Amino acid sequence: MLSIFKKINYPFIKTLIHIISPSFVLCCWKKNDEESLENWIKNKTNYKNVLRMSRHEKILFMLLNKKSEIEKCVYIKRYGYKIPNEIKFFEREFPTEKIPTERIILTNWLKGRPINTKNQNEVIETINELIKFQNKTKARLMSTDDISKEIMFIKNGLEYFECNKYEYDEWIKQYEKYMEAKNIRKTSVHGDFWFSNIIYDSESRKITFIDWEGYTKEGNPFEDIIWLLCNLMGMSTKEYAIQFKKHLEKKGEMSQMIKLIENKINSHFGFKLDFILLLKIYLIKWMIIQKQIKEKNSRSKINLKNVQIMKHEEILNILSKY
């Protein structure tokens, strides 16, 4: 069946999968396998009821208390062979350099939900928290060497994955001049700053950032800002190309909110950012990173296309007209 699917055009098979594939699978069984990972976790944590969620890089076992509320969570990295004898507890305190290296960790469950992107107050409060985070972690000025390393990563990535285009070269030159002309201080970088990793607790009205696997102590402060803007402009929607184009033309649903965000960010840095140029450069960078992940998982340069990479390429084609 998979070999047949590979020969069918992508838009058709995507629609077919949406129709026939469930959004989630609920498994129930009576057999009690004492040697299962789930039972091992129950024995080690003394929790009787768990919910399991499978994600790209990890598996989550959410531990429920007697009131059926999620209280703690066990995170298991997918890749690796060694299973520890014990589950270490990890206190969520970020930003920090102490990212857990253990394959299995236990943490307290963070109460709340992902921010509502259509709620202006929640989005603006998220930007305020990001600005506080960057002010708190502000470091030295970015040097020409820092800028050169970023440029070389992009150029080498484009060459390696054979993605060189004339407009990309022009954008990189513009970006290099742009960065060298600004006094930009390095800050800590979250590394995956989008809606699912921004939690809002409606009771305390507190914004918390989660999933710090991509954390960098000293990096480019534009990275988190541009990734959030990318998703607000439509990157994470089904009609991403249409939505992105509308927002570039200031006609999108989030246009007014994005304008408020841009003004806040400009005020934060003390100058008007070239958001179009930054979108171009960081979409190229993220496309390269996606290709690296795809190659690492497939161990081959062949057939490196996936949905996320195709999104990046399509939006970059749209941006080439601006």
Image (cartoon, helix red, strand yellow):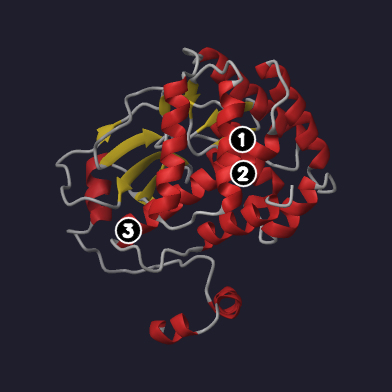
Say which element carries label 2: helix
Quarter of the rendering containing residue 278 = top right
Tell me if 50 is positioned left or right of 131 in this view: left
- Which residue is at 68% across, 57% downward? 240
Say which element carries label 1: helix
Q: Is the residue marked by circle 3 packed among few (<14), some (14-19), or many (20+) residues within 10 Å? A: few
Relative to 178, say whether 237 is above or below: below
Q: Position of residue 164 (x, y in %)?
A: 50, 54
Rendered image: mark on residue 92: none
As measured in the structure, the alpha-carbon distance from the residue carrying label 2 to the one carrying label 3 is: 26 Å
- Check disc 3 and give the amino acid type: Asn
- Check disc 2 and give the amino acid type: Lys
Identify the residue position indicated by label 1 in the image.
Answer: 174
- Which residue is at 47% across, 13% downward? 139
As measured in the structure, the alpha-carbon distance from the residue carrying label 1 to the one carrying label 3 is: 33 Å
Identify the residue position indicated by label 2 in the image.
Answer: 280
Tell me if 239 is positioned left or right of 103 in this view: right
First of labels 2, 3 by sequence position: 2
First of labels 1, 3 by sequence position: 1
Labels 2, 1: front one: 1
Quarter of the rendering containing residue 130 = top right
First of labels 2, 1 by sequence position: 1
Tell me if 252 is positioned left or right of 78 in this view: right
- Which residue is at 55% across, 39% downward? 172
Labels 2, 3: front one: 2
Q: Position of residue 9 (x, y in %)?
A: 55, 81
Rendered image: mark on residue 297: 3
The answer to whether mark 2 and mark 3 are in CB contact below 8 A is: no
Say which element carries label 3: helix
Q: Is residue 144 visible?
A: yes
Q: Is the residue marked by circle 2 packed among few (<14), some (14-19), or many (20+) residues within 10 Å? A: many
Relative to 267, say whether 235 is above or below: below
